[in-house]
Image: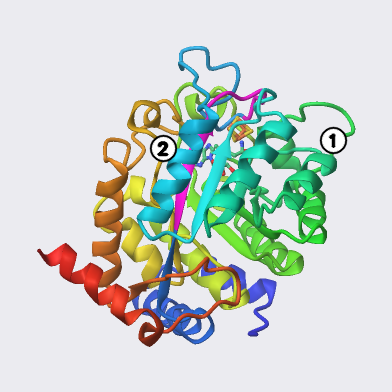
Amino acid sequence: MPDLSKLELLGWLRESRPARLQELYDWSDAVRNEHVGGAIHLRGLVEISSNCERQCMYCGLRQANQALPRYRMTREEILDCAHQAERLGYGTVVMQAGEDDLLTAEWIAEIVWSIKRKTALAVTLSLGERTEKELRLWRSMGADRYLLRFETSDPALFRIIHPPRRAGGLDRLTLLRRIKALGYEAGGGVMVGIPGQSFDSLAEDILTFRALDLDMIGIGPYIPHAATPLGSGALRPPIAASEQVPAGEEMVYKMIALTRIVCPTANIPSTTALATINRVEGRKNGLKVGANVVMPNLTPARYRSLYEIYPEKACVDESAADCNQCLRGQIYSLGRFAGQGQGGRGAVETLASVLPDASSRFVQLQA
Ligand code: SAM
Ligand code: SF4
């Protein structure tokens, strides 16, 4: 594993010469190919509730945003989405939501258990900061993975943008360590370009990914939402202009590439937020510089636009079938192939192992 020092990471994060950046992207793509292969894993995303008790300063789902109509999917709707994930050939279903107290531990546990009993899917949960008791229960029901981005490794900035909900709760880094100890595959990650975020802290983010030995690492651009204090400009965390990280796509590509080099076996998605800031090439570019996962949206159409974390989200108007076709088309246009199994960390699929299925799907797409 290349041991990039903090100084080297900072050098790359501040690099802007196109030829040097191309060298970085060629390097990270080669590391991706060597350690996780050409497969791109599809994880079906189901946004099960837009209710949230939190007041994160960056997120449109924050409780104080009363202009946003809220929804909570029923058990049957969620199970239908899981079956659809399986029908579409995905290996994983991801259940994501705000911190919604009405998603009780027992209710989620029964749904996880039902999905695991009736399908061959891996189940990923992303339900915010929940107690260790709840996490243990879901793990015992078969949940495989848990996603909890730590957003930034700068503790002072994190406190400003992510006010604690109650005293004595575990911080996200501690929670991620507990999640791993419970036997989940653990996913962390950050936003890039948060007001107040420094280059130094981005380098620390990458070192933190490595120190936590994360199985999944989600990196996306911060996108301002006008109904939030950070997005409206009402909240301006202090920082020198020369230290402020830009929110553009190039910064995200650099972060994905460096993360791939430093954490070669991690699963790294090319995110919807990246596809939002560059609708034509964003997702493909992420896949070219080190990412190996995409997350097609399975949330029923009537709820999609209500899960408005940030505005103008990509893929809000497409049906699940549209998303599936579009993403598979992008995958094949890159000369890569869709993974067939659950795609956990360390599962390296070769084209030969999936060829009969991949080629038949390609023929379907051409037809
Ligand atoms: N409530 C859970 C949580 O906070 O972990 C899961 C849902 S939350 C909407 C998922 C992720 O959305 C967050 O971890 C954050 O990185 C991302 N997000 C929220 N607001 C965003 C924004 N304005 N721009 C980009 N990403 C954002
Ligand atoms: Fe809620 Fe998650 Fe949004 Fe924070 S980031 S307001 S916890 S949905």
Expressed as whole percent of the image width and height from the top left, the position of residue 156 reads 75, 41
Of 129 and 357, the residue lying toward us: 357
Task: Check the picture and name the quadrant holding the C terminus.
Answer: bottom left
The magenta span reads 43-56
The residue wearing badge 1 is 169
- The quarter of the image that holds ligand 2 is top right
Q: Residue 69: x percent and y percent?
A: 46, 16
Mark pair 1, 2: CA separation:
30 Å
Q: In percent of the image, x 68 and y 58: which residue is there? A: 186
Q: Helix, strand or loop at disc 1?
A: loop
Q: How crowded is mark 1: few (under 14 residues within 10 Å), some or many (20 or more)?
A: few
Residue 204, which numbered label?
none
Instruction: Please tell me which residue lies in front, 319 or 190.
Output: 319
Q: Name the residue under label 2.
A: 299
- Residue 48: say if magenta: yes
Q: How crowded is mark 2: few (under 14 residues within 10 Å), some or many (20 or more)?
A: many
